[in-house]
Image: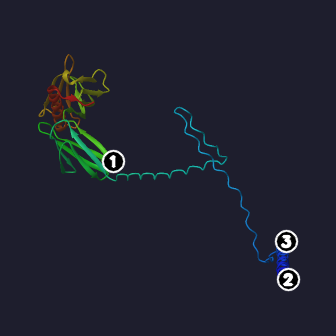
């Protein structure tokens, strides 16, 4: 065999070997006992396409309804209740008068000129004294309770409430009764028929006291004349009664109003 033929045979043999090796199946990899299966991936949902903007006046696109119920709105916390103010333990007196600069005293302590306020007055009974120039002083006993109270002192109001037991002397005999004076008039109460009377202050034609005779003479205009004495023969009661009635009559003539 020539050298050229030998090279040709060798070349053919190598080519056949290469072809056989390329057609043989590839060996499978050895199974691993601890192999974890690969996770299965779900396909991603396609994102919604953005809608083109609507022309002016077109309705806005509706949002898709959700089947889930809306979450409840939490209730607002309740506001704390304001604390009630403490009840007052003392009284507050607001004292006024119908005469300017009336001087006010409470339990003999000077408070000032009216109008004046007395704060934190102890509950209970207290003595109020008020004076004004040109008028008789006014003294009142007042009951004070916790809390405010308005007290009005009326100097220009005529107050009169008097009553005394008397004997009316007739020409023959006498009768007993009670003589009552108020700011509106004079009244004689008796069981003697024909002697009882009621007369206004302006109807008193005569109203005089005779201290030595212990006699109070009363003459009703267009009416009878009465002579009153004290059952015990004491002229002092008749004198005080006459004095206080005369003061009230003078104030009424000046224009002050009778107390109601």
Residue 70 vs 13, above or below: the answer is above
Residue 207, how many percent across, how many down? 16, 26
Q: Are marks 3 and 1 in contact (CB under 8 Å)?
A: no
**Residue 123 vs residue 96, the one in the foreground:** 96
Q: Residues within 10 Å of mark 2 (few under 14, many from 20)?
A: few
Are the residues at dot 3 and dot 2 in contact (C-beta closer than 8 Å)?
no
Relative to 176, is 15 above or below?
Answer: below
The residues tagged by marks 1 and 2 sit, at their Cα atoms, a distance apart of 148 Å
Q: Dot 1: within a 10 Å radius of its alpha carbon, few (fewer than 14), some, or many (20 or more) residues?
A: some
Upstream in the sequence, badge 1 or badge 2? 2
Number of the front mark, 3 or 2: 2
- State the residue position of label 2: 2
Residue at mark 1 = 147
Which residue is drawn at the image coordinates 56% and 37% (left, top)?
A: 60
Report whether residue 197 is seen. Answer: yes
Residue 26 at what x, y percent from top left?
A: 82, 73
Between disc 1 and disc 2, the foreground one is: 2
Q: Where residue 213 sits in the image (x, y, percent)?
A: 13, 32
Q: Nearer the viewer, residue 13 or 63?
A: 13
Q: Residue at x 84, y 82 (%)?
A: 6
Looking at this view, name the residue that lies furthest to the right. 1
List the residue tagged with mark 3: 23
Residue at 66% of width from left, 51% of height from top?
46
């Amino acid at each position: 065999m020539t050298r050229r033929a030998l090279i040709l045979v060798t070349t053919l043999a190598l080519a056949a070997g290469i072809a056989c090796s390329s057609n043989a199946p590839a060996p499978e990899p050895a199974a691993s006992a601890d192999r974890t299966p690969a996770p299965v991936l779900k396909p991603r949902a396609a994102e919604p396409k953005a809608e083109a903007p609507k022309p002016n006046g077109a309705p806005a696109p509706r949002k898709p309804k959700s089947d889930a119920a809306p979450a409840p709105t939490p209730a607002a916390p309740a506001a704390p209740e304001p604390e009630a103010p403490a009840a007052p333990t003392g009284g507050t007196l607001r004292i006024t008068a119908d005469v300017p600069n009336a001087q006010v005293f409470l339990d003999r302590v000077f408070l000032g000129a009216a109008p004046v306020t007395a704060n934190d007055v102890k509950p209970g009974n207290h003595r109020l004294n008020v004076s004004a120039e040109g008028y008789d002083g006014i003294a009142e006993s007042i009951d004070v309770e916790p809390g405010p109270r308005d007290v009005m002192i009326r100097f220009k109001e005529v107050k009169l409430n008097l009553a005394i037991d008397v004997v009316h002397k007739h020409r023959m005999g006498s009768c007993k009764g009670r003589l009552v004076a108020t700011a509106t008039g004079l009244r004689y109460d008796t069981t003697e028929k024909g002697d009882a009377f009621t007369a206004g202050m302006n109807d008193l034609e005569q109203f005089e006291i005779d201290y030595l005779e212990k006699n109070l003479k009363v003459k009703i205009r267009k009416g009878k004349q009465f002579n009153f004495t004290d059952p015990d023969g004491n002229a002092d009661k008749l004198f005080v009664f006459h004095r206080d009635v005369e003061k009230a009559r003078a104030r009424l003539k000046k224009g002050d109003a009778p107390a109601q």
